[in-house]
């Protein structure tokens, strides 16, 4: 009797997991752009210069992006405190 209840419990849990997985898969398939909405794009690099200039451009863009992200985080903290 105990084995039957254990098996039934296992089947119920598996059914719940299957339903949740099915809902999750349908939700992501319905909106394919949602998964990539925060994707990072490669920066456009001026290829007319030499490697050193290209490296400097990339480093500056990374610095600018990092500063923007830090400012956004600071603003979020200020908004959350209010």
Image (tube, helix red, strand yellow):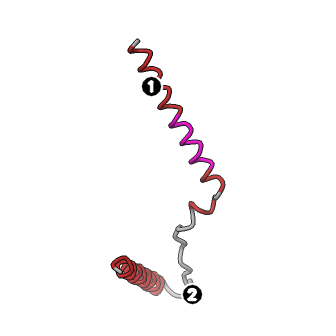
Of the pair 65 and 32, the residue shown nearer to us: 32
Q: Identify the residue at the far right of this view.
A: 30
Q: Position of residue 12 (x, y in %)?
A: 49, 29
What residue is shown at x 63% (from left), y 48% (from top)? 26
What residue is shown at x 64% (from left), y 52% (from top)? 29
71 is higher (above) or lower (below) than 21: below
User: Which region of the structure is painted magenta?
Assistant: 16-26
Of the pair 20 and 37, the residue shown nearer to us: 20
Q: Position of residue 63 (x, y in %)?
A: 40, 83
Quarter the C terminus occupies = bottom left
What residue is shown at x 57% (from left), y 67% (from top)? 37
**Viewer-side label of 2, 1:** 1
| Cα distance between the residues tagged 2 and 1 | 67 Å
What residue is shown at x 52% (from left), y 88% (from top)? 49
Location of mark 1 (residue): 9
Quarter the N terminus occupies = top left
**The label number, if any, that marks residue 48 in the structure image:** 2
């Amino acid at each position: 009797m105990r084995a039957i209840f254990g098996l039934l419990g296992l089947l119920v849990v598996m059914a719940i997991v299957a339903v949740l997985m099915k809902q999750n898969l349908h939700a992501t398939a319905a909106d394919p752009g949602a998964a990539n909405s925060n994707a990072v794009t490669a920066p456009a690099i001026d290829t007319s210069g030499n490697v050193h200039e290209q490296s400097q451009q990339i480093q500056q863009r990374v610095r600018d992006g990092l500063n923007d992200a830090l400012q956004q985080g600071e603003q979020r903290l200020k908004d959350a405190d209010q």
